[in-house]
Amino acid sequence: MNLQFIRKVIDNHSQCRHMANMIHCLCNNINTAKVDIAASQGAERAKDVMRVCGTKFNCGQCRVSINARLEEWRAINPALEAAE
């Protein structure tokens, strides 16, 4: 195997820890941490995340990304959701 290829793969995997800071909504500066906080407060849809963050949709391109993160959050935290 090519050593440069191995280095590139290792470098790409080392970036995974930065995914927690992924920007989902550029217009309103909503990142994964903010989506997770909104989810922990009961947000079930992107519209709910906007309400929790005190913002409104601008271009709307973030809906799919926010909804996908909410699904991931529910899969990671099923006990929190069931407790409500």
Image (cartoon, grey):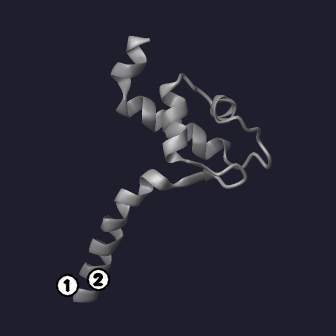
Q: Which residue is mark 2?
A: 5
Q: Are marks 1 and 2 in contact (CB under 8 Å)?
A: yes
User: 72 or 17, which lies in front?
Assistant: 17
User: 24 or 54, which lies in front?
Assistant: 54
Using a 10 Å C-alpha cutoff, classify the residue at mark 1 as few (fewer than 14 neighbours), some (14 to 19) or many (20 or more): few
Q: Amino acid at mark 1?
A: Met
Query: Going 44% across and 34% down the picture, which residue do you hit?
Result: 73
Place residue 9 in its image quadrant: bottom left
Please state the horizontal and vertical placement of residue 54, each as a whole percent of the image.
Answer: 70, 34
Quadrant in which the C terminus appears: top left
Please state the horizontal and vertical placement of residue 67, each as a whole percent of the image.
Answer: 58, 37
Q: Secondary structure at mark 2?
A: helix
**How far apart are labels 1 and 2 at the CA level?**
7 Å
User: 60 or 42, which lies in front?
Assistant: 42
* Residue furthest right as drawn: 58
The mark lying in front, picked from 1 and 2, is 2
Query: Going 54% across and 39% down the picture, which residue do you hit?
Result: 35
Specify the label residue 83 is tagged with.
none
Please state the horizontal and vertical placement of residue 21, each as a whole percent of the image.
Answer: 48, 54
Q: Which residue is mark 1?
A: 1
Query: Going 67% across and 42% down the picture, which residue do you hit?
Result: 63
Place residue 8 in its image quadrant: bottom left
Quadrant in which the N terminus appears: bottom left
* Relative horizontal placement of residue 80, taking residue 52 as reference (left or right): left
Q: Amino acid at mark 2?
A: Phe
* Relative horizontal placement of residue 56, taking residue 34 as reference (left or right): right
- Whether residue 2 is visible to the viewer of this picture, yes or no, is no
Q: Is residue 26 above or below residue 11?
A: above
